[in-house]
Amino acid sequence: MKKTDSNNTTPAPRHECSSGARQFWIWTAALVAGTLLGMLGVAWIDAVMQVVATVFTRLFRLVAVPVIALAVTLTIARFGAGGDARRLFRRTLTYTLLTTVAATVVGMLLYRVISPDNLPSGMACGSDADVASARAEMGDASYMDHLLGVIPDNLLQPFVEGNVLSVLLLSVVVGVVIARMPCSPQRDTILSLLTAMQEIVSTVIRWLIRLLPLGIVAYAARLSAEMSAGVALGSIGKYVAVILGGNLTQMFIVLPLFLLARRINPLKVARAMSPAVLMALFTKSSAATLPVTIESSERLGVSSRVARFVLPVCTTINMNGCAAFIYVTSLFVMQHGGAPITWSTMLLWIPVAVIAAIGNAGVPMGCYFLTLSLVSGVGGPVEVMGVILPVFTMIDMVETAENVWSDSCVAAMVDRDDRS
């Protein structure tokens, strides 16, 4: 017997489907227009597009933290710490682990097939300054300090710093407390207040999405201008081929197979979620993309209850692209240190990469810094990370798009399980 959901159970009406198709074509037109503007190479146009893109990124990051806090808190508060909430989390974690392991295995196989060569002996020289700059940006704290930073010592600190993991932790605790409160006018007032706040945030998000074609023009123009400047891959071409090849294989083959296994049409999901994946590609931030991801997922037909619980959780723990980057980059650096890359070594690093990616702290360039810490810990030549740094922006874009696509697939699969 199928479950019902008062928020969203019925398929999207025909007019909503046509609206979604119209939105897709509007965003596509904005993408083309932005690309052409970026290719012009006009300085003042590039400057204006940079400002517009920055404004949109800041606005979406502004609403991302409230979206996570309110969605997780309300879901747990309404459905309790056990029962539905626990079942949703268990299914989310299961699919997260399966997809993340799959992404790492794809990276392993491609690494074995493509077999990246060692860099020329002098190429890594001079990269120490880049690594030192990256370390300075990361700060003197170790990666363990970043993980300990998940435990806040100030109620407002996680929201001010945008620490997604800390916000998620606080939201779970508050949700459990409300769920365990006895039924009373006070509990009803708290739930009504949180629901009203969620509606306010949702309204702001809808406004932003209506204006987003302008943001897409800016994002595409900025990317086109950067690509026109050129990125010299040189001797790390095979390494980049492994990373990007793994990401694309995961996106276009592995994740669709997961959907097909649950009898879900991948093309339908891809069409509905394309706005979120495109935005992730340009913003390089799963958290900033989260409001669009939730809106697109609900337009797909995923129940609001599932989308608003699963997607915020996935944003923090479902890191397919990050796991693949950590895995491939660690092997690449160790190879330069003279370590034999045997099958046993490759298999051993799969759980390391998966666990590290799931526990990735929400810091800028978190995957890069985490990999830097890992290879330093095993005595790898960290100067190789300096060679990788110039192309990391391009890698990060594709990884973020893959992460959001994976989040979308997990939400669709959890929703399918929840309805059965």
Image: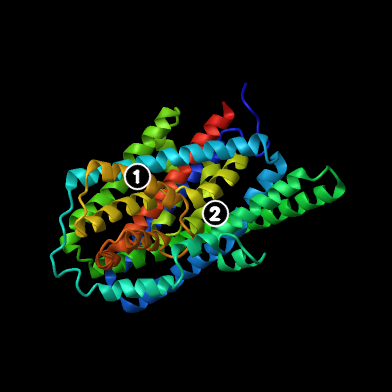
Give the residue type at disc 1: Ile
- For this orientation, the residue located farthest to the bottom is 44
| Residue 41: x %, y % from top left | 28, 73
Query: What is the C-alpha distance between the residues marked 1 and 2?
Result: 31 Å
Give the residue type at disc 2: Pro
Q: Residue at x 22, y 52 (%)?
A: 241
Q: Residue at x 27, y 46 (%)?
A: 345
Q: Is residue 67 above or below residue 102?
A: below
The answer to which quarter of the image holds residue 34 is bottom left
Residue 350: give its label. 1
Whether residue 21 is visible, yes or no, is no
Q: Is residue 322 above or below residue 368?
A: above
**Going by the image, does 10 lie left or right of 340?**
right
Residue to which mark 2 is pinned? 291
Q: Residue at x 18, y 53 (%)?
A: 116
Of residues 259 and 20, which is closer to you in this image?
A: 259
| Residue 59: x %, y % from top left | 54, 65
**Going by the image, does 355 lie left or right of 182?**
left
Whether residue 413 is visible, yes or no, is yes
| Residue 225: x %, y % from top left | 30, 69
Q: Is residue 250 above or below residue 203?
A: above
Q: Residue at x 35, y 60 (%)?
A: 377
Residue 143: give its label. none
Of residues 37 and 350, which is closer to you in this image?
A: 350
Between label 1 and label 2, give the one nearer the viewer: 1
- For this orientation, the residue located farthest to the right is 185
The answer to which quarter of the image holds residue 301 is top right
Among the two numbered marks 1 and 2 on one chain, the one whose residue lies closer to the N terminus: 2
- For disc 1, the neighbor class at 10 Å (few under 14, some 14 to 19, many from 20) is many
Element under disc 2: helix
| Residue 418: x %, y % from top left | 58, 31
Q: In the picture, which quadrant includes the N terminus?
A: top right
